[in-house]
Amino acid sequence: MNFFQIKKKLNMLLPNYDGIKTGEIIQINNDNFVVLSDDCLGSFTTSQKVEFSIPSNECLVKFYSNVIKSNDREVVFTLPKDVRYIQRRKYSRVEHTVPIEVVNINTSDKYIWATGNISGGGLKIISDKYFNIGSVFDVSFKIMENIKIKAVFEILRVEANKLKDNEYYLSGQFTKISEKDRFLLIQTAFKRQLELKCKGINSNV
């Protein structure tokens, strides 16, 4: 596991999206590893299943581990059995509509629009205004009641809605986003894909 190294930073997503914690690996043993959490004791309980992500330049490493024990900020986890490597260029994009606050970086004009789809690498915004390719915005939107994503967004493609006047689809990428927020977006996209699949809806957009 070359991604498993002492002092490696990682994100930890608690069950049911109760929260996301950060920390670093401080010890690796034959059947477990120890994380020094950035938060105080109380977040982790014995046998709790936690989802991890370790960001790198080329991909996102994902795996699950169970809590063996916790003491102060040190938490002992089982070694992962299955590990997934998600290439950044292959982030799944899925249909998902939520309100989004958009601020034009050049003019400071603020808009409240809606997302058309989301992914760990970017999104589509449904707008009532046309913008040129290359326009950059600060964006923020909630993926759950208590979780807000913040990022810098650059337009790469603009399409007009042929069935509705003054409606445009602004598709693009995040040029700045925290790894924690990217991780949560990827999880939300996966969850949304499963929901659509259960309903018999093609989630590829």
Image (cartoon, helix red, strand yellow):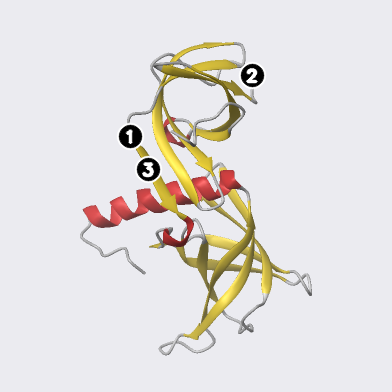
Q: Is residue 87 above or below residue 21?
A: below
Front residue of 151/62: it is 62
Q: Are marks 2 and 1 in contact (CB under 8 Å)?
A: no
In the displayed structure, 68 sits above or below 86; it is: above
| Nearer to us: label 2 or label 1 | 1
Is residue 188 among what the camera can see? no
**Circles 1 and 3: CB atoms closer than 8 Å:** yes
Q: Residue at 75% of width from left, 72% of height from top?
A: 109
Could you tell me which residue is drawn at 48 percent across and 50 percent down? 59
For the residue marked with disc 1, what is the amino acid? Asp
Q: Nearer the viewer, mark 2 or mark 3?
A: 3
Distance between the alpha carbons at the discs numbered 1 and 3: 7 Å
Label 2 with label 3: CB-CB less than 8 Å:
no
The disc placed on residue 40 is: 2
Disc 1 packing (10 Å; few <14; some 14–19; many ≥20):
few
Residue 14 picture location, percent across and down: 47, 30
Q: Residues within 10 Å of mark 2 (few under 14, many from 20)?
A: few
> Which amino acid does the dot numbered 2 rest on?
Cys
Q: Residue at x 54, y 21 (%)?
A: 43
State the residue in front, 83 or 204: 83
Q: Read off the residue under disc 1.
A: 82
Does label 2 or label 3 sit earlier along the sequence? 2
Residue behind mark 3: 84
Residue 91 drawn at (x, y percent): 43, 58
Q: CA distance from mark 2 to mark 1?
A: 28 Å
What amino acid type should be assigned to the residue bearing mark 3?
Arg
